[in-house]
């Protein structure tokens, strides 16, 4: 599951708008795990987006570079 969490975190960071807000259209188990690890704000709300924490944004950008660049 760690690889899936890494990929989702990378996508959240890659497609973030307003610097750190991203749509939360990913599996709830994954977003809950990212929340528990402190990478995103609480996904269990009525919003259609989540806010990445400073650490989540930093780690997500690192993972996006590693996973999606040539």
Image (cartoon, helix red, strand yellow):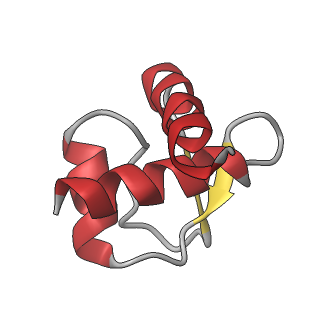
Tell me the quarter of the picture where residue 30 sits.
bottom left
Considering the image in quadrants, where does the C terminus appear? top right
Q: Is residue 24 above or below residue 63?
A: below
x and y percentages locating residue 4 in the rendered image: 30, 63
Most distant residue in the front direction: 70
* Image position of 17 (left or right of 59): right
Q: Is residue 3 above or below residue 48?
A: above
Give the tally of numbered discs.
Answer: 0
Q: Is residue 25 above or below residue 66?
A: below
| Residue drawn at x 61%, y 72% as measured from the top left | 48
Most distant residue in the right direction: 18
x and y percentages locating residue 46 in the rendered image: 52, 74
* Image position of 5 (left or right of 29): right
| Residue drawn at x 52%, y 37% as measured from the top left | 66
x and y percentages locating residue 15 in the rendered image: 73, 54
Tell me the quarter of the picture where residue 1 sits.
bottom left
* Image position of 39 (left or right of 66): left
Q: Nearer the viewer, residue 41 or 13?
A: 13
| Residue drawn at x 30%, y 49% as measured from the top left | 34
């Amino acid at each position: 599951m760690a690889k899936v969490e890494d990929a989702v975190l990378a996508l959240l960071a890659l497609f973030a708008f307003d610097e750190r807000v991203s749509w939360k259209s990913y599996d709830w188990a994954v977003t809950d795990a990212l929340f528990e690890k402190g990478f995103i704000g609480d996904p269990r709300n009525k919003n259609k987006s989540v806010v990445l924490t400073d650490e989540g944004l930093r780690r997500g950008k690192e993972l996006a570079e590693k996973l999606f660049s040539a």
